[in-house]
Amino acid sequence: MNNLLAKTKGTFQYNFAFIDEGSKREIRRKILKAIAIPGHQVPFASRELPIARGWGTGGLQITMSIIGPDDVLKVIDQGCDGSVNAVSLRNLLVKTTGVRTTFDSREATIIQTRHRIPEIPLKEGQILVYQVPLPEPLRRVEPRETETRRMHGESEYSPLWVSLYEDIVKWQAVSIGASYPCRVNEHYIMAPSPIPKYDINKLNMAENLNLFGAGREKRIYAVPPYTKVEPLQFSDKPFTIEDFSGLSCRRCGARNTFLDEIYDEETGEKYYVCSDTGNCDLLRQKNQEELRDEHDCA
Amino acid sequence: MGYVAVQGGITAIKNAEELTKYMRLRGKSIPLSVKQIQDQMRFLVDRVMGEGGLYSPFHASLAIKQAQGDPIEASFYLRAYRSTLPRLTESLPLEMEEMRITRRISSAFKNIPGGQILGATTDYHQRMLDFSLLEEEESQVEEFLHKQEQEKSEESPSWGPFRKVVDILREQELVKPTPEKVEEPIFDITQNSVAFPAPRSARLQMLARSETGGILALAYSSMRGFGSVHPTIAELRVGFVPVNIPHPYRKNKNLTIGFVEITEVEIVAKFAAEEKGEKPYFTLGYGICFGSNELKAISMAVLDRAMKEKEAKAPAQDQEFVLLHTDGIESSGFCSHFKLPHYITFQSALDRLRSTQEKQKKIKLTKEKRL
């Protein structure tokens, strides 16, 4: 990309982290507002990036606005560092910032993610940036933006509760899988981005800062550290997470992680591996070290 | 460290890029020059400039070459390129009467002051494939051009100014007088997130950048009867308009920094009164876009008028419906994002379905037992 420009423009160079400083400042102001009002969707003037709308432009704009030369970056898609789009977004960020990257979630200062929260709990000082396709939790009951904004303003959440109730009447359980609506700080209802229900509880009183960016829908929102996040549930029909009981990862043997269901290319046999590849690698390494230790002892 | 997929991802992306380039060149014909696209694919260039929101035939042509003729993809490149350009100044409002007209028609009146100019249009062509184009030789082209240019020099071009047809209606109080106050400050959709109801300046900007096919479909729904506004084209004009900016140093002086080709359409629609018992006027719809793109300008004018309805009774009258779903860059981006892996969300959905199936099975069994 830089070569192409060099040819036609001579001295033209992109700004650090692509977006111009004025736009970054606007986005940071919106982030601060979002942190001050947990779960509230703050409109912002989303910039066009060389990445398609819907492919993580909201998360990217947040990352680009907060990243500095000393940050350590991790980018994951579906929990995986090597997923094609994660690679593409990481390439763009590295190309325009030159920051150090890592696969180890403990090392990263900024983690940009799509659809997952890393398995290892994040710590104070770490920022998790979520790519959000549909920021509006009320969209499933109300298609109009004018209406949903009013509903948030008036805490008019009964249509959503009724839809959950109807689900239970019809199917004996809430049929929402990913992007399960949550109440933040006992006030706004928020779409946690399409993370699985498995990850929802990690948001509650998390030590890290969570920033959510929806580029196409032009919204930023946040869950600051140590903020209460509760999935919507009825006292007699409690919230449940995805069930992986009795299953384990084929690579690292973990029995307590979110698993991807995979079908063998040749035999069609079904097996499972960790969706968080960084954590899976660490567990494998640990297994091998233990094996070596045992061997040494013997 | 990491999965094989990490390496796979990087090489796969690189290979896909190479392969895309290969697909463009594998026919071994002479590579298209950007100049050729700019000269000979003018409607495509204009469409890409309009939807990309950047007036630059050169960059639009380059984008078309790079996107291998996909207009939405090319507009996307242009829009992303636009993000990197500095905003130097704001131009003064275009003086549309100053347009150097290449085409001007009215379907409201047979004769209009300044006259109708048919210009370059395929409207009255018989749409039969022209096989003579298969053998277009340079000598023929030269001869044709020579003849055209001789004829042109004989005619003295009339640069106007041309009065607006709508102004004639305004004088006769058939159309409401122009409001004296201009909306200030003008809403800039590239600097702000639009909320609804959106100010008219935002609506017009969004329509002007919208995807041609998208607004054509919605305008057509109105034309067919879903909230029809019964439009008549008071005036459609295509031509070059000077772009003026305030002089950076000298007060009360303007500078012309160049010309942009524009299609402008004004439609007159069914009459209405602001309040019951007040004087009724024809209502207006306004359409404008970069380059020569008449379908887009007409569709925009119809939608602009349709969205003025106080209460939206049809999709074309609903601001949020029309404006949020017709941006080509946004809609195509979201549509194509479904090609990204959705393993996690789908795993969640699988979990929901399996557990629900299990529950249904149990209920069925208990019911059967009871019988």
Image: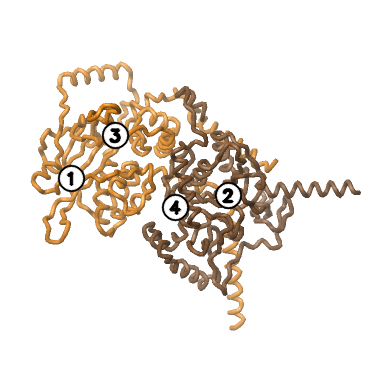
Chain A, which colour? brown
As shown in the figure, which amino acid type bears the numbered disc 3? Ser
Q: Check if mark 2 and mark 4 are on a common chain.
A: yes
Chain for disc number 2: A
- Residue nearest the viewer, comparing A66 with B349: A66
Question: What is the crowding at mark 4: few (fewer than 14 residues within 10 Å), some, or many (at least 20)?
Answer: some
Q: Residue B13, percent across and down? A: 57, 37
Q: Residue A265, percent across and down? A: 66, 48
Q: Secondary structure at mark 2?
A: strand
Reading the image, the residue beneath label 3 is B91
Reading the image, the residue beneath label 4 is A42
CB atoms at circles 3 and 2 under 8 Å apart? no
From what the image shows, is residue B244 above or below residue A35? above
- Residue nearest the viewer, comparing B267 with A12: A12
Chain for disc number 4: A
Q: Residue A100, percent across and down? A: 62, 37
Q: Residue A74, percent across and down? A: 61, 43
Is residue B158 visible to the viewer in this orientation of the structure?
A: yes
Question: What is the crowding at mark 2: few (fewer than 14 residues within 10 Å), some, or many (at least 20)?
Answer: many
Chain B, which colour? orange
Looking at this rendering, what residue extends furthest in the bottom direction? B371
Q: Secondary structure at mark 4?
A: strand
Q: Check if mark 3 and mark 1 are on a common chain.
A: yes
From what the image shows, is residue A6 above or below residue A213? above
